[in-house]
Amino acid sequence: MDLSPGQVAVVTGGASGIGLALVTAFARRGLTVVAADVERPDRLPPGDVVYRPLDVRVDAEVGALAGWVVAGYGRVDVVCANAGVVTPPALLWEQPAADWLWTTEVNLFGVVNTLRAFVPHLVAADRGHVVCTSSIVGLAPFPGGRNGAYAASKTAIVALCEVLREELDEVAPAVGVTVVCPGPVATRIRDAARNRPADRGESRPGTPPPPTVFDHGMSKVEPDEVARHVCAAIAAGRMYVLPNAGTAPHARARVERLLGEL
Ligand code: NAI
């Protein structure tokens, strides 16, 4: 799909990091952009950009946002389910239940809520593009990652996107799907607890990861680089985006391990 002025994009988690970079990139291309987030951005990028408060965990809030967008603009073209959080590292049997719950309700149900609210509008129009932010750990958890809840939520997003692709092929094949699987990106994700609701308690760090945890030959990239890859994938109709150099061999090794046992 060509990104062009007059189109409308919605980005959850649009106030910071990768989401803010997507908002900026779409606005630069002349789109009207809705940055939806639980936190208010320090600044909005230049262009036709509005901020809307949104907690992606709350189905009714996401539904109301979709209604507001379609009533106000008469269309929605690009939907980015990007909001996400991470909790401190711990072996998965050490991770507090509250960490599992909060991670799952934001990272998985936040995406489900966004898809349920917006995809019907894309299907009705038989055009548009869905972008979901997973992670390289959604394709292959890396040794010592120490975050089973995060890996599970991000793996689920890859599965959701693959099911979505297949189902859209039946009813609205022109609607695109892209799943973004970044390695390390320079954002505020390690400070995700800033948005942790009081009723989700506090996290307890568990057994720390080995010092080699990030030593897998993956480059760290800036959020703008991720947004550049996403815009290219939308234009080309590509499904998988791995924006960090050095991550593809990691995913390939997992598939080869699997094939080796079949
Ligand atoms: P970030 O912390 O800079 O941005 C995340 C945004 O999500 C924040 O603006 C935050 O307020 C928002 N958010 C959190 N909970 C929310 C909720 N309940 N409702 C609405 N918005 C909410 O972090 P970053 O890195 O930009 O994260 C974006 C996505 O990228 C996340 O899904 C994350 O898991 C994913 N990711 C990040 C990587 C990294 O190294 N930074 C690597 C792989 C994936």
Image (cartoon, helix red, strand yellow):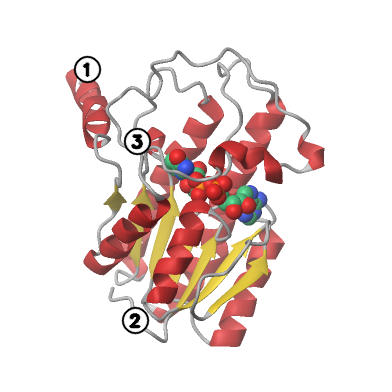
Residue 127 in the image, given as x and y percentages of width and height: 36, 76
- Distance from disc 1 to disc 3, alpha carbons, whole Å, reads 18 Å
Residue annotated with mark 3: 139
Residue annotated with mark 1: 261
- Name the amino acid, label 2: Ser
Structural crowding at the residue carrying mark 2, measured as other residues with C-alpha within 10 Å and reported as few (<14), some (14–19) or many (≥20):
some
- Name the amino acid, label 1: Glu
- Image disc number at residue 4: 2
| SS at circle 2 | loop
Q: Is residue 54 above or below residue 182?
A: below
Q: Quadrant of residue 70?
A: bottom right
Identify the residue at horizontal 36%, vertical 63% (top origin).
168
Residue 30 in the image, given as x and y percentages of width and height: 40, 81
- Image disc number at residue 20: none
Q: Quadrant of residue 211?
A: top left
Check whether the beta carbons of the residues at disc 2 and disc 1 lie within 8 A of each other: no
Q: Is residue 110 above or below residue 42?
A: above
Q: Nearer the viewer, residue 246 or 11?
A: 246
Residue 230 in the image, given as x and y percentages of width and height: 33, 59
Of the 4 image quadrants, the one containing the N terminus is bottom left
